[in-house]
Image: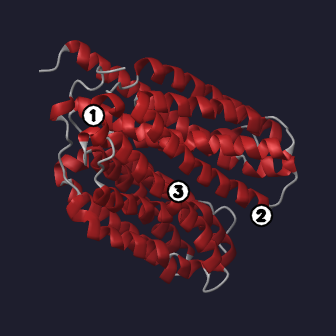
Amino acid sequence: MPQPAVLDGARAARLAVTGAYVAQGLGYAVIVTSLPALKARQGVDDTVVSLLVLGVALMAAAGSVVANAVAVRFGSRAALTLGLLVQAAALPLIAVPTPFPLFAAAFGLFGVGLGCVDASAAMQGVAVQRAYGRHLLGGLFAAATAAAIAGALLVSAVAASALAAGIALVCAAAVALVAGLVVARLGAREVPVDEALPPAERTRLPRAGIWVFGLVILAVFVADSAVSTWSTVYLQDDLHALTWVAPLGYAVYQAVVLVTRLVTDRLIPAIGRRRLVAIAAVASAIGCAVVALVPVPGAAIAGFALAGVSAGALIPVTFGAAGELDRMHSDQVIARVNLFNYAGAIIGAVVIGLLADGPGLGIAFLLPAVALAAVLFAVPRFRTRPDAAPARESVTEGR
């Protein structure tokens, strides 16, 4: 039986990592919902904003690589602390009026912090999950989703002006700073790979598993980015929904993501990872197909709701499974799987937009439907039990 001190360490680490997920969800939501006000302040057009968003995605991929390098050398706790502090530095720079080159550089810096936290928060979540010996990642990702909803409501509450957006960004920076300091003190501590393994063993990664789980993450983020970027546009411009109805597609999508994440940790032991992955993939593929093939506002909103099951369940389940591919290389594996996140996000936002100019925005949602259906080929690679037994004391080992 684990010693009380180990349990206390695990509880503290879980609290710290939950705070990191909250900071991540809040910061990203405040950024994306402040874009109209920031666009007006900087005097740029939609093309420039699109390029900024693309730049954030590319820099986030670089941030995931940074997280891997730091985690290998110093442990994932150090990587997560670094990512949160980078965000805490970038958000105030975005908040204050600056010349456009500095504004764009601040966005790039935020992207690095975003990717670093994306990867290292999953690393830390897997470490905490191992310490508890049960599934916890669904709840951690739910904290990020709830914080994202709160961030959007915060920007809405303070009104869509550049000054108000700046205040919201500074608040998000303060949360990131506090979360970073808490993680630095209480985050899960594991022996870094540079110390745990001889040099010859450090680069032997389960590449086939990385590609399988990475492609699952890519499929999910194709759908997530498509819904996040284009659902409101599709409902309003193509289906001519009422102005107040158009945002409901994204609203119900996020609501389903949150609810699904809240129940995922309990569903895994009840029905198994494989069955949960299959159900989530089929439900979301059907949802995207409904959006594509039934051009009616009510049907589209229902389809967007079903699409939320994939982001709600498959992201925490897949990162949890990826972290179990190789116990000693789990941080490196997670960092590599996380890179597929940004490829999926770019495909979902950019390719769907290009298809909108050809066959149409509605039919373009067949792309995420096919991507999610393809997840069924990966189902046999998912196991149900968390690889916890050998690592119960991981939160108190090493640095």
Mark 3: which amino acid? Tyr
Q: What element carries label 3?
A: helix
The residue that appears at 25% across and 45% down in the rendered structure is 326
Instruction: Identify the mark nearer the N-term, 3 or 2.
Output: 2
Residue denoted by label 2: 47
Crowdedness near tag 3: few (<14), some (14–19) or many (≥20) residues, C-alpha within 10 Å:
many
Badge number at residue 197: 1
Q: Are marks 3 and 1 in contact (CB under 8 Å)?
A: no
Q: Identify the residue under disc 3.
A: 342
When the figure is inspected, residue 214 is found, relative to residue 294, above or below; the finding is: above
Whole-Å distance between the Cαs marked 3 and 2?
19 Å
Residue in the foreground of this view, choosing between 361 and 63: 63
* Image coords of residue 349 (percent x, y): 60, 65
Q: Which of marks 3 and 1 is in front?
A: 1
Name the N-terminal-most of marks 1 and 2: 2
Q: What residue type is labelled 2?
A: Thr
Q: What residue type is labelled 1?
A: Leu
Alpha carbon distance from label 1 to label 2? 47 Å
Residue 284's quadrant in the figure? bottom left
Q: What element carries label 1?
A: loop
